[in-house]
Every structure is written in C-alpha cells, then in structure tokens.
Image (cartoon, rainbow, N blue to C red):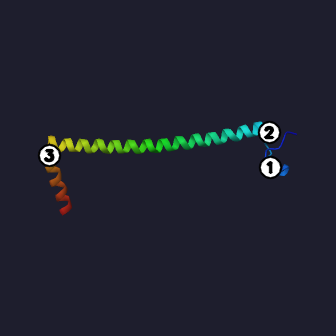
Amino acid sequence: MTDLPQGYEPHEIPPDYTGPLFLESQMRAVIEAEREAISDEYAARLQGDLENGVRWLNEAAASEFHKKYPQLASFNEWLNEREKDD
C-alpha cells in the first residue's frame, strides 16, 4: 500500500486514492476551477467595459447629432414633450 496522504486516517482515504496520481488529479481540479473563475471574471469585466464603451459612443453620437442638426434635435424634444402631455 502507498503512503497515506498527510492528515488522513486509513478510514478517511477516498476510494480512488492512488497516491501521487490522486493528488495530481486534485490539483488539476483546483487549477481548472481557478482558470474558470478567472475566465468568468475577465468576461464580466470585459462585458461591462464594452457596455460602457457603447454608452459613450451613443452619447458622443447624440451630441454630434445635436450639433449638426439642431432643428431635428429640437423636433425630437418637441415630440417627447407632446408624448408627456398625453
């Protein structure tokens, strides 16, 4: 029989324990979990930045529209006011 993992009693050993192979598989599971957590966090932060970038582009485009077409912009405001009155 192989040496027991440190801190385990014989009755606590998992049935699939085969010494270093078991420990290696445990390490792989931990590494995979960490990799997944890092990937999820990166994706969430990237999505947030992309959404902020789109919002900024929309604000920049709206500002440019107001500068280039002030009459149309005021017409849109007029329409919005009429909707509020209804």
Label 2 vs 1, first from the N-terminus: 1
The amino acid beneath tag 3 is Leu
What x and y, as percent, mark residue 22?
A: 75, 39
Q: Secondary structure at mark 1?
A: loop
Q: What count of labels does the image hold? A: 3
Amino acid, disc 2: Gly
Which residue corresponds to mark 3?
Answer: 72
Q: Quadrant of residue 47?
A: top left
Gap in angstroms between the C-alphas marked 2 and 1: 12 Å
The mark found on residue 34 in the picture is none
Quadrant showing the N terminus? top right
Residue at the disc numbered 2? 19
Residue 8 image label:
1
User: Dot 3 surroundings within 10 Å: few (below 14), some, or many (20 or more)?
Assistant: few
Looking at the image, is mark 3 or mark 1 earlier in the sequence? Answer: 1
Residue at (58, 39) in percent of width and height: 35
